[in-house]
Image (cartoon, coloured by chain):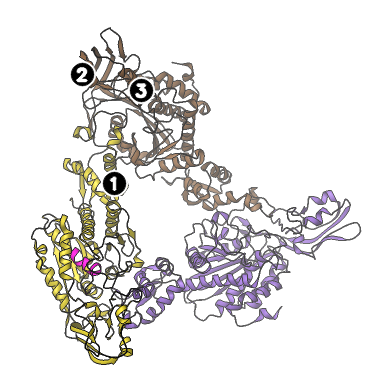
Chain colours: A purple, B brown, C yellow
Amino acid sequence: MTASSDSNTFSPDTAGVNMMAWAEDLFPICRSLTGAGVRQTLDYLEERLPGLKRHSIASGEPVFDWQVPPEWNITKAYIEDEAGNRVVDFADNNLHVVGYSEPIDRRMSLAELQDHLHSLPERPDWIPYVTSYYARRWGFCLTDRKRSALTEQTYHVVIDSSLSEHGQLDYADYLIKGRCSKEILFSTYICHPSMANNELSGPILALALAQWLSSKDDLRYSYRFVFSPETIGAIVYLSRNLNTLQSNVLAGYILTCVGDERKYSFMPSRYGNTLADRAAKHCLHHYVGNYEAYSFLERGSDERQYCAPGIDLPVASVMRSKYWDYPEYHTSADNLSLITAKGLQGSFDVYGKIIDLLENNYFYTVQVLGEPQLGKRGLYPNTSKRGSANAVRNLTNVIAYADGSNDLIALADRVQLSANDVMAHLSPLLAEGLVSAVDGETNIRG
Amino acid sequence: MTASSDSNTFSPDTAGVNMMAWAEDLFPICRSLTGAGVRQTLDYLEERLPGLKRHSIASGEPVFDWQVPPEWNITKAYIEDEAGNRVVDFADNNLHVVGYSEPIDRRMSLAELQDHLHSLPERPDWIPYVTSYYARRWGFCLTDRKRSALTEQTYHVVIDSSLSEHGQLDYADYLIKGRCSKEILFSTYICHPSMANNELSGPILALALAQWLSSKDDLRYSYRFVFSPETIGAIVYLSRNLNTLQSNVLAGYILTCVGDERKYSFMPSRYGNTLADRAAKHCLHHYVGNYEAYSFLERGSDERQYCAPGIDLPVASVMRSKYWDYPEYHTSADNLSLITAKGLQGSFDVYGKIIDLLENNYFYTVQVLGEPQLGKRGLYPNTSKRGSANAVRNLTNVIAYADGSNDLIALADRVQLSANDVMAHLSPLLAEGLVSAVDGETNIRG
Amino acid sequence: MTASSDSNTFSPDTAGVNMMAWAEDLFPICRSLTGAGVRQTLDYLEERLPGLKRHSIASGEPVFDWQVPPEWNITKAYIEDEAGNRVVDFADNNLHVVGYSEPIDRRMSLAELQDHLHSLPERPDWIPYVTSYYARRWGFCLTDRKRSALTEQTYHVVIDSSLSEHGQLDYADYLIKGRCSKEILFSTYICHPSMANNELSGPILALALAQWLSSKDDLRYSYRFVFSPETIGAIVYLSRNLNTLQSNVLAGYILTCVGDERKYSFMPSRYGNTLADRAAKHCLHHYVGNYEAYSFLERGSDERQYCAPGIDLPVASVMRSKYWDYPEYHTSADNLSLITAKGLQGSFDVYGKIIDLLENNYFYTVQVLGEPQLGKRGLYPNTSKRGSANAVRNLTNVIAYADGSNDLIALADRVQLSANDVMAHLSPLLAEGLVSAVDGETNIRG
């Protein structure tokens, strides 16, 4: 473990650097839906997030329309030529083996082997990432350059893996209690072997946000972090926590593909109109500017489960370069050189803005009839001359729409300011008691 | 009667050819609001649609704000010059006489005659179509070329017509019972003499649709066809069936101007937001592509009555070239050369798509929580690699919005597919019981 | 007083000329929030509007979040150089003194004096308008040309003003009773010294509208006119009449900046969706055409109070060149040469149209089922031929949407006509009893 990742106090300004260090530690681990790699990853997270709750479910358990798969573990795998050279070796890169490959130890011709090989002719130096979770197969992934160099001979193919029906699927969650029981949810996945943007950027951002929020001493909302394998893990988590989540979650986000510097992306919830969507779009618009707005029709991560009919959780996703839409996606080129401290810091900062916005997202209401007299409070220039009215326009606009019908996001949209700027105007008014903040959910004064 | 029109089994693929044959049979008949021509037309329809219900109402009967006009019949009409030549003869073309002309048998100067002549200077070879239903007049319509050739002399003017206060107005309807009593309505008119696009294309399309639907053995909805003179006929029909129609009609269409090949047109209902509008627009968008979307402000057929305040039926209209907007409209040039089997077939096909859509227009709801596991049902590629997720995107999108809140039209719009394509995805899911169809009207499972 | 302003009968066609004459009378008076100038102005209005109700409130009274300021009066003010020349004299232009200047009589150096001088370097020949209502100061405003010419010497500075804590703030209102107690409100302000567009155009338009409406013998609505100092006067008026206004006012307008010819402007209410907004926008669109649509974020007059949270009155504003957005605003150049009889007449006419529209703004409902038979009432051409249907299209469209769900504004928008044109179509139908008018507010037949 590196020293940089063991700091006890969390500084949001250096989150990106911490995250890069964690990514380096976690990158080599061979994760999959189940198995030792997942547990090793959760151990690492737990060290940095005391209080992380570990959970497991037995292979074979039915969950919603699915069944928990057998537990997969692997110790070694290679293809050896007649001269005893390991032409492909899992020890070099854990992408070399198709995920959930069944064991094999057999000699075969190149022709027979070819049916089990996967490569990318258009990217001859990249190893593709392939899995076969729900149909029993075995296979190797390799660069197309190496595959093209294979000659007609007998190869010794070894995969020393196990698929146990008596295994388990591991996952974890972490809850930070705020003043109210309503929750903001962050869900990320821990089931991909050595890939950086998709997937490591997700769990390390979750870890950074969880550390940061844990260091705060007065949170309005509770915050829930979920670390589970993609799809089946989300389904397990939902099947075991559905009532709680449906009762409590006000907004949630899938953390994935948040590590590169190329752009920002937004994936909405099923109808795109939840608090999660509104808060994220406000922050992307005001604090990022340009970003790619995707349709829910283009989704591909755990919003597929969180936003499914009958689940209906308000879950969206702010990403950098989205899965599918960057060339290195699901290949060996999605490595530690693709993500940067700066890219990760950018994602951390946007989610930080979203959290700030949600924490401040009250229905503000001015407490006097007519405009308040700002002058006597030192908030208005007390000489009127040409142009001076413009100087307080934003302040008076904030007051005009602080009518109890707009939450902070709607108020900011009305007055064409960022939520940050609105809060700067509201702060002295809140301090003066000229404006009060009402919780839209519970109608209890904030 | 031609052989082609007497076929007992209906093939939707050759509907256009059948319709053209019917048009040829019906074209020569001199129809008007009332009289022998209307009955002769209904006889023809009844032969091909056993079970057609004939109705009549006596001249003079009050209906809503109107009164049924006297029955008009005509045997002959001509203008004879001094040499005994019939310069205009109703026997040549039944457009030559102004509809509802009172009888006359008198000699007069050209100057006096001119007040009773109608022609089109800008279209010198076309005879215009003119009527005077509610003010007693007589008149002749002729080509402007012929009118210009008239010389100063005494003409013998003969119209052998009758306007009987003891007559009747004839109309008919035809009901096909489906599994539920809710109805889809098609209304068309039978009051124009020899004109093809406006009007014959309407009743022959109604006949084709009625034959086709009668040949089906399992219809969800009931289908009502109305054949009546325009305006006063629709008013009579509504005055006698208003409660039934308001209780039962889910969507209706005026069939008119559906015979040429030039384009497709759409006339919405009064507010443009009924099921009839939504279904028609979906089909025009997905199965036709380009079409002319008119405003209700430009309406001119029986949607004027069906969509009137207090009637408020959900009635729209899909047309080819709309009345008023093609040069031959209401002239002798709107003849059998303007409509084609292909043009009529196109209209039949679009209405067929609308009917298919309505029959399938349930609120689909996925029956499991979270995404269903498509792999175990053979609906998902069981090896995940780069790009394979795209292959099932449409299927998973259909499932995501099959949440019980969208009818088929809304679901198709959400996933940016045609209703046909959505149904192709839904069919195996419905067969598996993974999705159920709920009737939005009655909340009874479909 | 000029003869032109004493006419007993009001002619709307010459309103602009009358208004110009009133402006000339009122221009020289030195108005402020309080004091003799306000009372002199109200005297003038009362002479022309018998029944004007005068009100006052004592200095120091708390109103909402404010306190009524002391009463300010001024008799003379000047700056005299060592040679005894009055280089600046309030007698020349009442803008020369900062509004609410405290008294002073002292000799001082130019350096000390400079801190109390206001000029406009970018407009060297204009005197700026400056006030300091709520902080005790004194000051002079002058052209920058004159200021630059001041030399180092000792000046004698005299302001003979008084700020009385035992004074009062004056305002007035005027109510014209209509058939129903619901009100249309016009509010204008009387607190600016010699400036024409902002402010005199407002009170003289209010006077013209009040005279005109008083001369009418059958008004549907009641009309309320308020003349008060800006901001504090509106707050006083609201604090004393809030329940009445909230119960009765259906639509209201701030009358300000209505005198020049340059353009028309529109300031909406807080959410821009009240009857006041809808009526004004309809009239601006149909009777003016081009106009500048401002956002409520750019407001600056008494809609700040009337539309404040908790007040929530439906108040908008139709202006010519809006305050802040014309160069002469709040300077001596906003004088009688900026406003014209034609400019004022234009504003009078638009407000006249708004009033006509509101008076006619019923929910019209056709009284027969199906389309009425227009022919028997002489409203439809009784010969049908090509194109004749177009001639009555607007009439039938008006009937189609006279379905009881649209008020006049919505109906006019639906049929793409002005309210005037709709009323021209509706008049014979109302006379025939074919259409009835229902009051949307009270559901009593109009």
Magenta span of residues: C192-205
Res A17 → quadrant: bottom right
Three-letter amino acid code at disc 1? Leu
Q: Chain of mark 2?
A: B
* Residue bearing mark 2: B112
Is residue C361 shown above or below B232? below
Earlier in the chain: of badge 3 and badge 2, it is 2
User: Disc 2 to disc 1, how far (Cα)?
Assistant: 41 Å
**Coordinates of residue C424 in the picture (x, y in percent):** 21, 44
Q: Chain of mark 3?
A: B
**Coordinates of residue A176 in the picture (x, y in percent):** 54, 75
Q: Residues within 10 Å of mark 2 (few under 14, many from 20)?
A: few
- Closer to the camera: disc 3 or disc 1? 3
**Residue B221, labelled with which disc?**
none
Three-letter amino acid code at disc 2? Glu
From the image, give the main secondary structure of the stretch colored magenta: helix
User: Disc 3 to disc 1, how far (Cα)?
Assistant: 36 Å
Q: In front here: A285 or B222?
A: A285
* Residue bearing mark 3: B124
Three-letter amino acid code at disc 3? Pro
